[in-house]
Amino acid sequence: MKVKKLLCAVMLSAMLVASLGATTVYAGSTISDSHNGISLGGSVRYASAPSGTVNGITATTTCGPANYLYAKAVVCYKVAGNKYTNSATNSSAGGGTSATATTNDVGVVYGGIGTHSVRVSGWEWNNKTTSIGENW
Amino acid sequence: MMKKRGLITTIGILGAVMCLTCGCTKKVDYSDEYNYETDCQYSYATDVDSWKKIQSDGSNQYILKDNFIYYYSTESGQMTPLCDNVNCLHDQETEQSRITACNAYAPTKNILGYEYIQYYDGNIYFVSENSLYRVSKDGGKKDIVFTTDFTADDEEVPVNAWLIHRGYFYYETETYYYGEDEDTQIYTKCSLKSIKLSSKMSEKKAQVIFESDEEHSVLNLGGLKAYKNYLFYNVIANQNDFEMTDNESWIKQLYYNVYMFNIETGRNEIIPVPEGYSETTKISTIAFLKDKMVFKIYDDLEDEEYQLPIYSINYDLTNEQIWLDNVEQGKCILSYGDYVILSDADIQYFVKDNKESCNIEIYQSDATKVSSFTYPFNSMSFGGFGPDGVNVEFKDGKDSWQVYELKFEDVLNCQGEEVKLELVGERKYGLMHQGD
C-alpha cells in the first residue's frame, strides 16, 4: 500500500496535467457533477510505459475547494490467457488527485475502472465510477 | 529461464520445509473425497483470478454483488441479502454506518482488485483490507476472525489473494523493497502463508509457503485453487531492472509459473511446461478430475485461436500426456465431478465480437465429448457448475439485476442447441451499485 501511494505521488503532477488537458474521451470514461456551484469530475484513461505501450489505467478526481479527494484505478489485464486486476489509490486535500494502476509492464491491458470520491463542507460525492475498455 | 525459475522456487521450497518443521498443529482426517463443505469449490474456477463470486452450501447459492452478499434459497425461490438484522434495509440503506452494520455488507475489493467470498463449513467468509470476516449462513452474525499484524512502521498489511481449504486459511501479502534510488526503484515482494482456521488466529502462528526473492518484483501471486490435498497458485514477476520496450519484450522476460503445494507433505513445486514448446509458452488454467488434472498451455506471442494441446497429468506429476489435441488456446477449461468443460467465451467476446453467447463443450475424463450447447450469455467467462450442479449467472438491467440458473443434468446430452436459463431472482439496485 505504501509503495502504491508513493508511486502515485511521484506521478501525480504529470498525470494531473495530462488528464486535465486534451485527453481522448471514451464512452463512460468521464463523469461530472456540481454541488452549490462547485464542479466535480472523474475520469479514467489508459496509461503508458515510456516505450509508449499501454501498461495501466489512470483515474483522476477533480474538484475545486474540497476537503478530501480520492481516486482509485483498477486495471484489467491478461497474462497466459488468464484475467487479472491490479489497483492503486491516491487522495489529496484539494484541486485534483490521480491514481495509476499499472501491470508492472507485463500483460495485455484490456480496460479498467476509476472510482472517485469527494468530500466538501460535509457533503459527500461518494464512490462514483468511470470505466474504459473491458472490465472483469 | 531455468535460472529465473530456480531463484524463486528455492525460496518456496525452503519456506515449505520451514512450515513443516515448525508446524505442530493436530491433523484432522479429511476424506480423500471432495467435500464442498470443507474444500475449495474448485468447479466455479474460471480464467478470472477473482473467481469466487458465487458459492454454494450444496443446495442454495451465495452471490457477491456490489459489495453485498445475497442468498438464493432453492426451496423458497427467494433471493435476499444475507442479513437477518431487524429493521435493516441492507443494500437500500443510505447511511454508511447502517450499511456497515448490515451483515450482508462485504466491501471486498482490495488493492489487487480481488473481489470474492467463500463458503466454508456453514459460514461465508470474505476479506476486507487486512481482516478475514465470517458471516453465518443464516445471516445472523458477522465477525472478524483474523487480522494481519501491522508493520514495524505501524502500517496495515492488506490481504490480497486468499483461500480457505481443509481447515486452513491461505493468504498472500505484499511488502516493498527499494533499489539505490528509493523514489523510482520500488519493488514488490510477496509471501503466501497458511494459518489454521480457529477462534484464536494469530499471524504469529502463520507458516510461510512461498516467499519471493529480491531480484524480482512480483506483480501477482494469485490463481489460488485447491483440490483435495493440493494447493495451486501462480506467480507473475519481472526482473527488477526490466524495462518494457515493446509488447514482445515483457512476454520474453516474464517470470510466470504455476506452483503446486502438497498440504500434507509440504512439497512445493512448479508444474512443468511439457517439453518441446517455446519459452513463452506457460501453464495457463488447471482443472481437477478425480484421479488426474488437466491443464492448458498458452503462448502470449500467439492469438486466442492458436491451437495447442490440453494435457493431463497425475497429481504426483507423473504420466503427463496429451488429453485433447488442437484446442484453441483461448478456450477456458473447468471441471465438474469427473467431467471437463470447455468454454469459448473469450474467443467469442474478443475475437468474434460476439457479446451475446458462447459455446460450451462437456467431456468425460477420457476426453470423449458427451455434450455441446450454446450458452445465451457471454460475460467473458462461463462460470461453471457449483457442487449443487447449478450454474449461476447474473445480468445487469437498467434498474435491477437478475439471477439465472442452469442445471448440469439438463445439459449433459445436448447436441449443439442453445439452452435456456431459468430466471430465479431479481433485485433492485442499491446505492452501492454505480453501473457497469
Image (cartoon, coloured by chain):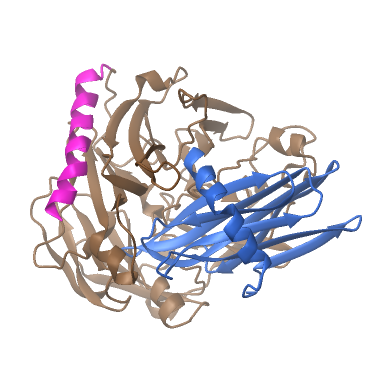
Image-based side of B368 in relation to A34, left or right: left
**Residue B40 falls in image quadrant:** top left
**Camera sees residue B74:** no
Q: Which one of the lettered chains is coloured brown?
A: B
Would you place residue B293 above or below residue B93 in this image?
below
| Residue B386, horizontal then vertical, whole percent | 43, 52
Q: Is residue B5 magenta?
A: yes
Front position in the image: A16 or A91: A16
| Residue B254, horizontal then vertical, whole percent | 27, 58
What residue is drawn where x is 75% and y is 39%? B96
Q: Is residue B23 magenta?
A: yes
Front position in the image: B2 or B83: B2
Would you place residue B171 above or below residue B387 in this image?
above
**Camera sees residue B376:** yes
Viewport quadrant of the N terminus of chain B: bottom left
Query: Magenta: predominant secondary structure element?
Result: helix
Marker count (numbered): 0
Region rendered in magenta? B1-24
Front position in the image: B189 or B40: B189
| Residue B114, horizontal then vertical, whole percent | 49, 48
Q: Which one of the lettered chains is coloured blue?
A: A
**Residue B29 falls in image quadrant:** top left
Would you place residue B376 above or below residue B165 in this image?
below
Viewport quadrant of the C terminus of chain B: bottom right
Image-based side of B286 in relation to B420, left or right: left
What residue is drawn where x is 24% and y is 64%? B252
Image-based side of A121 in relation to B349, left or right: right
